[in-house]
Amino acid sequence: MKKLLTSAGLLLGAGPLARAVNRFPRPDFESGYQYPEYSYAVPNEMLWDIIDVSVLLILLGIVTWALFKKRTRGPILAVSVVSVGYFGFFRGGCVCSIGSIQNIALAFVDPSYSLPIAVFLFFIIPIVFAFLFGRVFCAGVCPFGAVQDLVNVKNFRISRAVSGALSVIPWIYLAFALLYALTRTRFLICRFDPFIGIFRLGGDIGVISFGIVLLLMSIFTGRPFCRFLCPYGAILNVVSRASIFKVKITPKPCISCDLCHDSCPVDAIKAPYGNRTGETPTEGVKRIVIYMAVLPVLMLAGALILRWSSPDLARANSEVRLYEMVTEYEASFSDVMEPEVEAFYSQGRNLAELEASKDEVLKSFRLYSTLAGILIGLVVGLKLLEMSLKRGRKEYEIDYGHCVGCAKCFDYCPQNKILAKNE
């Protein structure tokens, strides 16, 4: 045990050292100091990238094996602990698949931006696994989802109407994250990540407090961040609906005991029901036709609203903000000069150059704000359509878009317990 603790301590100490070395040249002493003949190089960042991607693939493989082969939650729970420990506290939540969305977007519009290969792999590998097996990344490999799952002890149901409305928020978050990344303004996801400060044991007190609130909520309802905030989860939601291999609650006939439905922390199991509203098929079709007619109106409204708001949204950009500060200073001739304004003049830049840069940013904001508005309008319209669809089911079915592969339903299903005994 003592050797194990010593090894763990060395491993934890190697992370910060690996990030601290080889970034700056050695100091050139004038006192005649001689460096030791023998030195030991600490692994560089490339090695850590390889380790990170390898751990990602191994954990994804374990979750997939546990879901499709063993049909048990135990290995997934172990993966959650490892993920929180390694990707969370040890690696500080970085590289992050959620934040990689912004890097991918920036690389798309900025040829000068060098996209790290590890960031690309952390973005694409979970998506590939989602297309093949569903949201196995969310099951326990993502440290954000894993830490919420580990503290969950009770699940209070949220009404279908409320959860449907809240599930639009990740898409709005995604739209604005893409908008600010594509305009080279800032990385919103990284700036307001609620769990990074907890994993790094420091940071903005407001963001950390928000993360703590989410963890407290996770005790009583399953994964609030994953369901109602995570922009990467929104992408995986769409991809996993078309997954090639789909997990089943049990291979045996369903006995409609309702235990799987009650145990699901994210309400991703649909119970069998008939047409509760008692409406005729004609009335249902009319309602769907109305929503389909409203869909382009919502997209147009979203585009116009965000395009009209683009000058205000652009004020978060450093060039636009600097232009406002410089013009205000030159108009007032104040003796007090802001540090940004002072740096502007010290660099030899002129107002015409800054204005041209500002106009280019505003043009970019008008374009991407319009596209973001279209996306938001489309999502709202499709959510209305989804919630209006009513279909009878004879047995319990998994909603593969929302299912996070936690495998809790496996342990509650009586049919699975019979299979386990027979094996």
Image (spheres, helix red, strand yellow):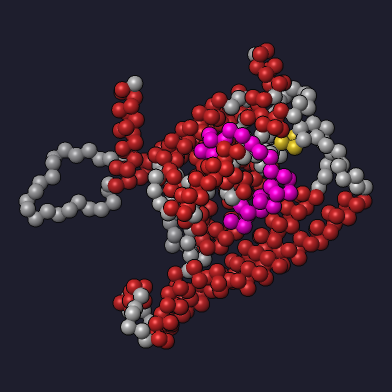
Region of the chain picked out in magenta, as a range: 147-173
Quadrant holding the C terminus? top right
Q: Quadrant of residue 364?
A: bottom right
Q: Quadrant of residue 155?
A: top right
Residue at figure coordinates x 82%, y 45% from the top left: 390
Residue 69, can we see it?
no
**Residue at the image position 32 percent from the left and 83 percent from the top:** 335
Quadrant of the image for the N terminus? Answer: top left
Magenta run includes residue 249: no
- The answer to whether residue 177 is visible is yes
View extreme (left): residue: 32
Percent x, y of residue 264: 66, 34
Name the side, left or right, on which 21 lies relative to 180.
Answer: left
Does residue 371 sit above or below 139 in this rendering?
Answer: below
Left or right of 210: which side holds 45?
left
Q: Nearer the viewer, residue 126 or 351?
A: 351
Residue 48 percent coordinates (x, y): 38, 41
User: Which secondary structure class fits the magenta region best?
Assistant: helix
Is residue 18 placed above or below 68 in the rendered structure?
below
Asked if the stretch drawn in magenta spans residue 163, the answer is yes
Looking at the picture, does residue 116 appear above or below residue 397? below
From the viewer's side, name the closer residue of 157 and 5: 157
Question: Seen in the image, is 28 located left or right of residue 367?
Answer: left
- Residue found 76% across the figure and 54% down from its top: 384
Q: Is residue 170 above or below residue 146?
A: below
Indicate the position of residue 37 as horizontal and vertical percent values: 13, 40
At x 31% / y 37%, what residue is drawn?
A: 13
